[in-house]
Amino acid sequence: MMKFMKRAVKADDGEVKVLSHISASGRKALFSGVALILLFSFFAITKKGLFLSTGNLINIAQQVVTYAIIGYGLTFCLVSGGTDLSAGASMALSGIIVLTLLSMGIPWPIAFIASLIFGILMGILNGFSIEVLGVVPFIATLGTQWVFRGLANVIVDGKPIYTNVIASQSTQDIFYLFGAGKIGGTGLPYSVIIALVYGIILYFVLAKTRIGREIYACGSNLEAAKLSGINTVRTRMFAYCVSGFSAAICGILVTSRISSAQPMAGQGYELEAIAASVLGGVSNSGGEGTIINTIIGALMMGVLRNGLNLSGVNSFIQQVIIGFILVGAVALEVYRHKKQS
């Protein structure tokens, strides 16, 4: 019996040593991945005929694109110790800008680039408000959310505009492909491929570059980062620019997918993207988290939303469920930090 117990202790020690070599973000990704598998399995069993159909899985993938792309940008903000509540409004404004430019006959590459640059400018405005004017991120991005939402309404007089305002049919067809087109007409949506490629690029930027390491340093301890010579203003402004750029990409894809740009589009998207990031393991207090965490969290949100829809749960109850899950995830995060300290 004693020999068995000693072996068990050795096995436990080995497991602890293995886990200790995995970063905090990696451990969270591992646990979140297990939760995702359990969630997927639950709906696959309870809604077998519907959930696992090809059409439904593609539908989940398209839903995840929105959470993931906005979540990528918010991951940069959260890891740097900030947040961005204007992401949903930025998405709506970017969609209106690209469709307005296309309706004026401007070539689609130029319209796309202009919309993306505008996304970066929105990020610069957020970064300037926070890093230069000294407004706390929550208030600053709440204020710019109203600015961006107001501008979106002003440009289109509060009304949606549709892709049929584009004079060229070929431009309409090309624009439609980005958000709603699929490989071979019925395969994987192009928007999923765009989200994956963009996620891989941002993963390497955050994990493997100097600016990425500086973002982690700012989120872990801002004062220590300043003392070590990091230009914290430039670094955190870069994080907000990534968030604005990501929202602009999402705005283009969503406008393409639903064939219209609406000034009230994207309401609450930033909160759902934050929820996805936190569920995946990105720390809401800064310094921890990767793009992989965000992708796992976005998948969890997509599977959960889809499974609840198939189960006939109305959208209001879904908000209650997701809200409790988010509070639970943050509470676990707070408990873990207290335990570590």
Image (tube, rainbow, N blue to C red):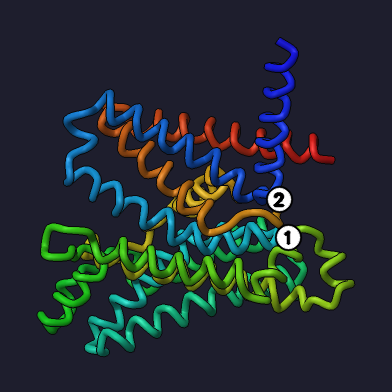
Q: Which mark is residue 285?
A: 2
Q: Identify residue for label 1.
A: 219
Q: Do the residues labelled 1 and 2 touch (CB within 8 Å)?
A: yes
Which residue is nearer to you in this view: 286 or 201? 201
Residue at the front extreme of this rendering: 3
- Number of numbered labels in the structure image: 2
The percent position of residue 113, horizontal first and vertical second, equals: 38, 84
Which residue is nearer to you in this view: 306 or 260? 306
Q: Can residue 30 be seen in this view?
A: yes
Task: For mark 2, give the secondary structure.
Answer: loop
Task: For mark 1, give the secondary structure.
Answer: helix
- Residue 329 occupies quadrant: top right
What amino acid type should be assigned to the residue bearing mark 1? Gly
The percent position of residue 61, horizontal first and vertical second, equals: 30, 51
Which residue is nearer to you in this view: 245 or 92? 245
- Residue 197 occupies quadrant: bottom left
Label 1 to label 2: alpha-carbon separation: 7 Å
* Residue at x 77%, y 68% (from the top left corner): 134
Q: Is residue 71 above or below residue 202?
A: above
